């Protein structure tokens, strides 16, 4: 129990946990091997109302708050972080389409997204760099009722599995930086789109890859937000996904801790349970404390969002702290299992899975810059 989660949210979490335990957990390791996202599972999640429940009902959601999305992310991630990427991409892209899309284009996609019938990627990073996202180079040029898109995006989650992508490109001058960027919704079956898949360390069921655009004609109706305002308007959604990522990885850490506490309480060495040795139990107690605190910070960020209050700094705190903490926690848990932890299995897969979020959606350094700007002022922290 905690002050953020009322009885309704606890009941929703319980329902999501039952589904995740019965339907998601059993294929966790198999999907890591096959690297295929289970579309059937995605539809089941949609039918249960687990995908972007925070969207208005008219946009396919349930009109619930961000905290509802948070508890569902936790429960699905606990069973398989890769599968909870479906929820993450839907919440991030759903908010963008809902707030910035033309209704006649956005609505059908939102309905498919929340039903688990469509997967949307988000494409910002380019081969020359991701941290300095405003320096992107992919060209978007107007040609009557269309935009012509040319360029390359890299390291895009679900690149080869997505049905469409929210793509950020340059419509203005390079010198205009963030103010010359436009966002488009680009269906992946348009002529001129090609893509591939990387061999990832973790999160292998969702995967990452390249997106190439060669003279891709996108109707102007597919623009998200205003021309040249894509970065300034559309990027606001990242505060939401940063808090959700925090909850996802902390949930993986919590599952690892629970299993490890049970293991060290029964495994014997030198005539005692491992937990009797402070060298074993105190690191776990330290991490247990920090996971509890970091989770409350993530819930606080979502609570602030639901109240319409500023939460960029809090979201950035969630995004740098939780993935690093989760990695350190799972690492410690793995060591507590001795040689068994090093075998291919759930613990080493968790370690591989959570590592990606120390980079994806922005690194710790970039998050700390966002926090510094919020505290010291943008002028005092120019880059
Ligand atoms: C699992 C995963 C999923 C991803 N999914 C997506 C996705 O769906 N869509 C998408 O667009 N991108 C995605 N990415 C890409 C990710 O957003 C970028 O990798 C990230 O923003 C960093 O960019 P970069 O890799 O080009 O590193 P660089 O920008 O080249 O940075 C390299 C290093 O230098 C540091 N650095 C850079 N600038 C500064 C600075 N000013 N001060 C201090 N340190 C700095 C960085 O923190 C980093 O450690 C994903 C990446 C991963 C690993």
Image (tube, rainbow, N blue to C red):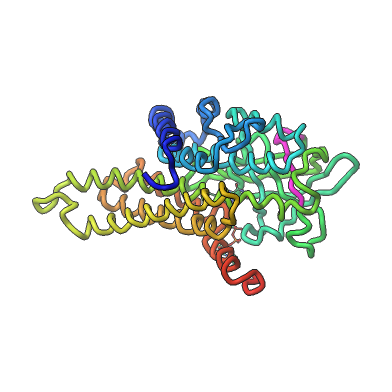
Q: Which quarter of the figure has residue 170?
A: bottom right
**Residue at position x 48%, y 52% from top?**
300
The picture quadrant for ligand 1 comes to bottom right
Q: Main secondary structure of the magenta part?
A: strand
In which quadrant is the N terminus drawn? top left
* Residue sitting nearer the eye, 190 or 263: 263
Query: Does the magenta-highlighted stretch encompass residue 188?
Result: yes
Q: Nearer the viewer, residue 152 or 367?
A: 367
Q: Nearer the viewer, residue 168 or 47?
A: 47
Left or right? Give the position of 336 relative to 161.
left
Up the image or down, 356 lies above or below 317; here it is: above
Residue drawn at (66%, 30%) of the image? 58
Please indicate, yes or no, whether residue 353 appears anywhere in the rendered image. no
When asked about the image quadrant of residue 266, the answer is top left
The quadrant in which residue 157 appears is top right
Does residue 211 appear in this view? yes
The image shows residue 25 at horizontal and vertical percentages of 40, 33
Magenta-drawn segment: 182-190
Q: Is residue 140 left or right of residue 275?
A: right
Judge left or right: residue 138 versus residue 36: right
Q: Position of residue 311 (x, y in %)?
A: 56, 56
Total number of numbered labels? 0
The residue positioned 54% from the left and 52% from the top of the image is 304
């Amino acid at each position: 129990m905690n002050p953020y989660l009322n009885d309704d949210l606890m009941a929703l979490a319980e329902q999501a946990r039952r589904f995740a335990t019965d339907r998601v957990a059993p294929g966790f390791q198999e999907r890591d091997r096959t690297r295929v996202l289970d579309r059937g599972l995605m539809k089941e999640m949609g039918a249960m109302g687990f995908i972007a429940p925070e969207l208005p009902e008219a946009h396919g959601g349930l009109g619930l708050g961000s905290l509802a999305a948070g508890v569902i992310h936790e429960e699905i991630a606990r069973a398989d972080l890769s599968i909870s990427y479906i929820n993450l991409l839907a919440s991030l892209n759903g908010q963008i389409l809902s707030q910035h899309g033309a209704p006649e284009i956005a609505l059908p996609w939102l309905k498919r997204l929340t039903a688990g019938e469509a997967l949307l990627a988000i494409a910002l990073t380019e081969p020359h760099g991701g941290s300095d996202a405003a320096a992107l180079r992919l060209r978007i040029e107007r040609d009557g009722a269309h935009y012509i898109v040319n360029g390359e995006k890299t390291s895009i989650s679900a690149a080869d599995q997505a049905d469409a992508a929210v793509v950020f490109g340059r419509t203005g001058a390079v010198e205009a930086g963030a103010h010359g960027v436009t966002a488009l919704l680009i269906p992946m079956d348009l002529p001129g789109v090609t893509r591939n898949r990387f061999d990832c360390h973790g999160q292998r069921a969702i995967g990452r890859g390249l997106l190439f655009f060669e003279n891709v004609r996108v109707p102007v109706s597919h623009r998200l937000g205003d021309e040249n305002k894509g970065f300034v308007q559309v990027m606001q959604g990242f505060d939401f996904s940063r808090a959700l990522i925090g909850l996802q990885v902390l949930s993986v850490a919590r599952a690892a801790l629970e299993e490890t506490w049970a293991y060290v309480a029964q495994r014997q060495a030198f005539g005692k349970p491992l937990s009797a040795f402070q060298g074993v139990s105190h690191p776990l107690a330290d991490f247990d404390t920090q996971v509890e605190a970091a989770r409350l910070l993530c819930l606080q960020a979502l609570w602030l969002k639901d109240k319409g209050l500023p939460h960029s700094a809090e979201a950035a705190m969630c995004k740098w702290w939780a993935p690093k903490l989760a990695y350190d926690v799972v690492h410690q848990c793995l060591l507590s299992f001795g040689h068994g932890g090093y075998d291919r299995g759930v613990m080493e897969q968790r370690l591989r899975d959570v590592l990606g979020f120390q980079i994806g959606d922005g690194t710790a350094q970039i998050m700390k810059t966002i926090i510094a700007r919020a505290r010291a002022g943008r002028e005092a922290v120019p880059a």
